[in-house]
Image (cartoon, rainbow, N blue to C red):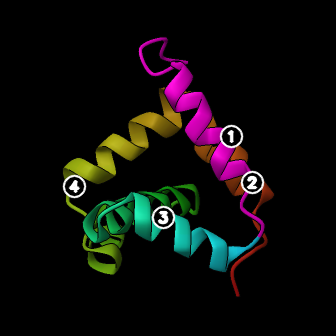
Amino acid sequence: MNPKIKTEAVSRLFEAILTLENVDECYAFFEDVCTINELLSLSQRYEVAEMLREKRTYLEIAEKTGASTATISRVNRSLNYGNDGYDMTLARMPKKN
């Protein structure tokens, strides 16, 4: 974990997020906290991570998500050398229909 982000303020934000009880509450909170573009960027990265774990090609991912190859590469680097945050949440998510 990057010690630069481990601050009291960030911990407090994460604690606030953990109080959210459902998707509607998440929408309300994140619409207040993030710009639309920030939220769409976060969701795009998560979708890219899902597709990379499904062994999709960069071309498929770029076409489906609109993500640049730089974004796809950055997410791939996090999947391979990061803190396993993506994999932890992907493992806990129900399978897509």
Which of pointers 4 and 2 indicates the residue nearer the eye?
A: 2
- Secondary structure at badge 3 equals helix
- Label 2 – label 3 distance at C-alpha: 13 Å
Which quadrant of the structure image shows residue 83?
top right
Residue 73 among magenta residues = no
- Secondary structure at badge 4 equals helix
Question: According to the image, label 4 marks what residue?
Answer: 69
Look at the numbered discs 2 and 1 and tell me whether their residues touch, using CB distance below 8 Å.
yes
- Secondary structure at badge 1 equals helix
Q: In the displayed structure, does residue 35 sit left or right of residue 75? A: left
Instruction: Give amino acid for label 4.
Output: Thr
At 41% from the left and 43% from the top, the residue drawn is 76
Instruction: Give amino acid for label 3.
Output: Phe
- Secondary structure at badge 2 equals loop
Instruction: Give amino acid for label 1.
Output: Glu
**Viewer-proximal residue among 72 and 46:** 46
In the rendered structure, find residue 19 and report the number of the disc placed on it. 2
Look at the numbered discs 3 and 1 and tell me whether their residues touch, using CB distance below 8 Å.
no
Seen in the picture, residue 3 relative to 88 is either above or below; the reply is: above
Question: According to the image, label 3 marks what residue?
Answer: 30
Instruction: Give amino acid for label 2.
Output: Thr
Question: According to the image, label 1 marks what residue?
Answer: 15
